[in-house]
Amino acid sequence: MRAVIYARYSSDLQSEASIEDQVRLCQLRANTEGWSIQKVYSDRALSGSNKFRPRYMELLDNIRAHQFDVLIAEALDRLSRDQEDIAALYKALSFAGIRLITLAEGEINELHVGLKGTMNALFLKDLAAKTHRGLRGRVEQGRSAVAKPMAMRWCGRLILQASAYAAYAPSMKRKHVSCVTSSNALWAAHHQQPLRGN
């Protein structure tokens, strides 16, 4: 049988190795079943709540073209955390006669789609509430509600944060300014105001 693998991790804070680990485990399952892996689709640092991921969209196109017989993923939430998207994916796979196998749940059926889809939707709702709570706490403390600015490398091997760059930008030599790569820092310098944050 022709099989494909889908792997995804959702955050820049997660390890790049996560994709390789997922693919390796899915490959082992395919080998056990005697399936031939035709393609690996992977989306890096992209949320499962958004279906508009490049490789996921390509996967959907290839389902419609019936280019494989089995889709393997580590878990249903790697494909999507959105209940509606999972249901649509399952419907497309069923229509094309393609099996969906996950390492965590086994062969997916309507029951998995309903239960896991609901659980994933609740997870996203809970995550959004916790994120909002954390951002509100930062604002109440007088800090920035956005994530910490990315540290950047200055050509003189000095590490600055975006807020520091804004303060020192006027005194930096032109060659050093060209080495700065943080868009947050460039915005702050352009508007001549420091970014708040820690």
Image (cartoon, grey):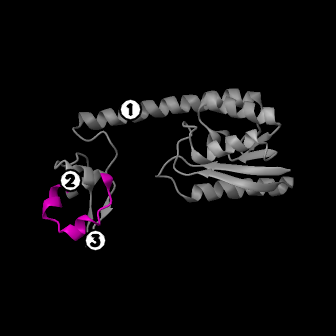
Tell which tag, 2 or 1, sits nearer the viewer: 2
Label at residue 132: 1
Q: CA distance from mark 2 to mark 3?
A: 17 Å
Residue 141, quarter of picture: top left
Most extreme residue toward the bottom, as rendered? 156
Label 3: how many Cα within 10 Å (few below 14, some 14–19, many 20+): few
Q: Position of residue 116 (x, y in %)?
A: 66, 32
Q: Which residue is mark 2?
A: 189
- Give the magenta-colored segment's residue range: 166-183
The answer, for residue 170, to whether it is visible in the render is yes
Q: Which residue is mark 3?
A: 155
The residue drawn where x is 64% and y is 41% is 79
Label 2: how many Cα within 10 Å (few below 14, some 14–19, many 20+): many
Residue closer to the observer: 55 or 16: 55
Q: Earlier in the sequence, mark 2 or mark 3?
A: 3
Tell which tag, 3 or 1, sits nearer the viewer: 3
Label 1: how many Cα within 10 Å (few below 14, some 14–19, many 20+): few
The answer, for residue 75, to whether it is visible in the render is no
